[in-house]
Amino acid sequence: MAEATGIQLDGAQVKMAVQALQAFLKTTSASKSLLLDDSQPISLLFTLWRIPKKAQTIRIPLPNAHRTDTDEVCLFVRDEPKMTSEQTQRFYKKMLEENGVKSVTEIIPYNVLKKEYKPFEAKRRLLNNFNVFISDESIRRLLPSHLGKHFYERKKVPLCVNMKSKNVAREIQKVVQGSNLKVTNKGSCCMARVGHSAMTAEELTENIEAAIKVVAAKIRMKEPVIKIIHVKSQSSVALPIYTANLSHLKLLKKAEKEAKTAKAAKRKTGEKEDASQTESSGQGEKKAEEGEEEDEEEIPQLVPVATPSKKPRLQNPKKKKKKQLEKVRKAAGARPRKHAHANRPRRAGQTNSKGKRKAPKVK
């Protein structure tokens, strides 16, 4: 586990980067005459020193909500026993209203997802209609086969919620307003959403500091891993807020050297053990030879008994004659004899094989 104290952020620099990013987004929105409600997400881009061996997903609780009120949330729930799909929808709507949850806009039971959203167009419409997808833990493993690959390509995978907990509102709020960082083993860069452009600079800086602390504490690598951290939006350049010292390279080289020395030591110990085993076996053989020399006696040699040879197989006399004739022909170099009817004299007026007609001989 990486130490959280290994990353020392400069709060003033983070705030300056956030203010510069917000100013850039305001100028672009004014030039393109975008709507007031159209706010862009702001994310943290982590660059690592090396590619991790195993993939990991880190949940990041944030002090300030990083999603807008206009974001629509879809909830997938299990089918309640002895209830129709409409009755299950009413049951869960009532439960969310009693707990004070207002962020969920639509509830879809598992049976409805399986039947009504089977065509590709229906799945694409569902993907475009909602910003966030959450699901009950009991049906989380059944969803990938019904949702399709497009949910995973656009990073809208449903997040798990425990609908049986006593405080359902807190669970949903934690998942919807929290962030996730997916550390993959296919590259050295990963990104986590931290806020949106409508937030204040103070709220964004608080979210950034909290996210970096959680990531530095939960990432599964021993040595310091994080190389550079940037802040960016969808349409802006990445602004650096943290760069690691070159001393981290020395630590990485030390860790590599220690691993190499440990491997070499293991090999040497294995070779020594093999050599000691060979020496002990050689000494045992020498002792056995000395004992044999002392107790040497004339041992009568055993003579192998001659086994009766097998009788040759009898061959047919016809086959023997054919083989003899073939040997004689090969030795004489004679050509194989043609059929008897080939040398018969042709009659007058008989055609040749090539189609030519021979004239009769005149006496």
Image: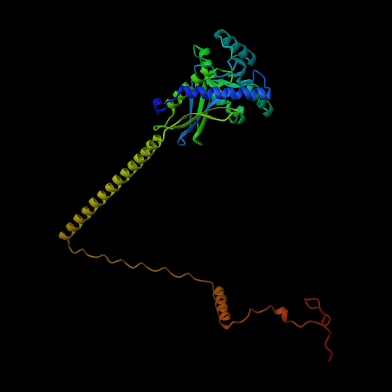
Q: Is residue 190 in sight in this rendering?
A: yes
Relative to residue 33, is residue 300 depicted above or below? below
Quarter of image, res 329? bottom right
Q: Position of residue 292 (x, y in %)?
A: 18, 58
Residue at 53% x, 23% y is 18
Colour setting: rainbow
Q: How many numbered marks, from 0 up?
A: 0
Residue at 67% x, 19% y is 35
Quarter of image, res 198? top right
Q: Nearer the viewer, residue 153 or 222?
A: 222
- In the displayed orientation, state which residue is furthest to the top: 98
Relative to residue 143, is residue 95 depicted above or below? above
Left or right side of 269 for 221: right
Q: Which of 211 and 116 is in front in this view?
A: 211
Residue at 60% x, 18% y is 73
Q: Nearer the viewer, residue 14 or 361?
A: 14
Q: Which of 269 and 17 is in front in this view?
A: 17
Q: Where is residue 270 in the image (x, y as percent from the top left)?
A: 30, 46
Q: Position of residue 70 (x, y in %)?
A: 62, 17
